[in-house]
Image (spheres, rainbow, N blue to C red):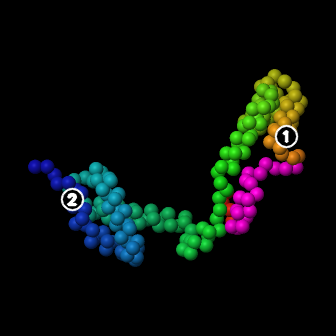
Amino acid sequence: MSEPDPRDTLVDHLPALRAFSMSLTRNSATADDMVQDTLVKAWTNIDKFQAGTNMRAWLFTILRNTYYSNRRKAKREVADVDGIFTESMAEKPAHDGRLHMTDFRAAFAQLSDEQRETLILVGASGFSYEEAAEMCSVAVGTIKSRANRARLRLAELMHLDDDEAMELTDKATSGVLSANGTAAF
């Protein structure tokens, strides 16, 4: 005769689990949630239960570990019962960045091969002018000149003024974000 399925005995331990959970949390709703989490974890990991061992002890261990995991997690969370903090948060739409990147790619593609290569080496890859010059077998002044001309051409193609930084969002979105106070970028 085969061993009975341990899942069949989970229900027998519910009152003891709830009592233990209540003693830990002192809140009936939280205790019920923890018992439910414990049963879900036990059900999904039933293959780890060793037949012939103490099911109640195994379930209590899961519940205890769940309780302490929840407490550690709660220490990192901010209580916002009234939703005041949440209302003050705003996030810049992702489409702005994608649109600017599309514009940048189009402008970057219009640069000469030498200018693109220089910007990739010096700007994106972080090589010094001297290292880039050595890699390209040209003088350091040539690399500096190419980088400067490439940057100016990019600004021109992207319609940026000399003193103007690239806006990462439009004015309407900026207004909404600043009206909400704190913005999460």
Quadrant for the C terminus in the image: bottom right
Q: Which residue is mark 1?
A: 156
Q: Is residue 27 magenta?
A: no
In the picture as drawn, the residue positioned furthest to the left comes out as 1
Q: Which residue is mark 2?
A: 8
Residue visible at 60% across and 68% down in the picture: 86
**Can you give x and y, in whole percent of width and height, for residue 139 in the image?**
87, 26
Q: At numbered mark 1, what does the secondary structure look like: helix, strand or loop?
A: helix
Q: Is residue 148 left or right of residue 51?
A: right
Residue visible at 50% across and 63% down in the picture: 73
Foreground residue, 98 or 136? 98
Earlier in the chain: of badge 1 and badge 2, it is: 2
Q: Is residue 178 magenta?
A: yes
Q: Residue 157 occupies which quadrant of the picture?
A: top right
Q: Is residue 168 left or right of residue 148?
A: left
In the picture as drawn, the residue positioned furthest to the front comes out as 172
Q: At numbered mark 2, what does the secondary structure look like: helix, strand or loop?
A: helix
Foreground residue, 88 or 148? 88
Residue visible at 71% across and 58% down in the picture: 173
**Can you give x and y, in whole percent of width and height, for residue 182 in the image?**
69, 65
Amino acid type of the residue tagged 2 in the rendering: Asp
Amino acid type of the residue tagged 1 in the rendering: Glu
Foreground residue, 55 or 77? 77
- Where does the magenta region start and end? 163-181
- Badge nearest the viewer, 1 or 2: 1
